[in-house]
Image (cartoon, grey):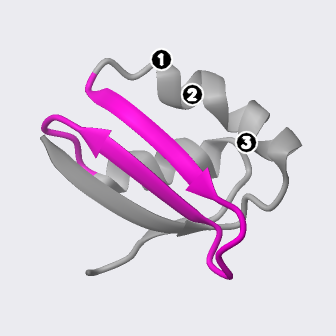
Amino acid sequence: MEILIFTTSVEKPEQVSEVKPLLTSVPAITGWNFDLEDCDNILRIEANDISPRYIESLLQTAGFNCRELEY
């Protein structure tokens, strides 16, 4: 399992609700959460064998900016 961390444009709980069905529909994702208190509106994903680019495009199709953070 790997942990991926992204900066996003998701800023409100209502927007998290919009993204939730997308993230929960991906079988490779075993867990996820947003930190909306962080200035980068962090999305943390626990997944098995998934491309960061796939997550970025998934959120972009929902109208949100998303970029992997190197750590």
| Amino acid on which disc 2 is placed | Leu
In the displayed structure, does residue 52 sit left or right of residue 35?
left
Residue 70 lies in the magenta-colored region? no
Residue at disc 1, secondary structure: loop
**Alpha carbon distance from label 3 to label 1:** 14 Å
Q: In the rendered image of this protein, does residue 30 appear above or below residue 5?
A: above
Q: Which residue is mark 2?
A: 22
**Residues at marks 2 and 3 touching, judged by CB atoms closer than 8 Å:** no
Q: Nearer the viewer, mark 2 or mark 3?
A: 3
Q: In the image, what residue occupies the spot 68% across and 82% down?
A: 39
Q: In the rendered image of this protein, does residue 55 appear above or below residue 30?
A: below
Residue at disc 3, secondary structure: helix
Is disc 3 surrounded by few (<14), some (14 to 19) or many (20+) residues within 10 Å? Answer: some
**Residues at marks 1 and 2 touching, judged by CB atoms closer than 8 Å:** yes
Is disc 2 surrounded by few (<14), some (14 to 19) or many (20+) residues within 10 Å? Answer: some
| Amino acid on which disc 3 is placed | Val
Q: In the image, what residue occupies the spot 70% across and 56% down?
A: 64
Of the image marks 2 and 3, the number of the one nearer the N terminus: 3
Q: Which residue is mark 3?
A: 16
Q: In the image, what residue occupies the spot 67% across and 36% down?
A: 19
**Alpha carbon distance from label 1 to label 2:** 5 Å
Give the magenta part as a residue range. Answer: 28-51
Toward the front, the furthest residue is 37
Q: Position of residue 46 (x, y in %)?
A: 30, 42
Q: Nearer the viewer, mark 3 or mark 1?
A: 3
**Alpha carbon distance from label 2 to label 3:** 10 Å
Q: Which residue is mark 1?
A: 25
The label on residue 5 is none
Q: Position of residue 3 (x, y in %)?
A: 25, 53
Residue 35 lies in the magenta-colored region? yes
Task: Indicate the quadrant where residue 50 lies.
Answer: top left
- Figure quadrant of the N terminus: top left
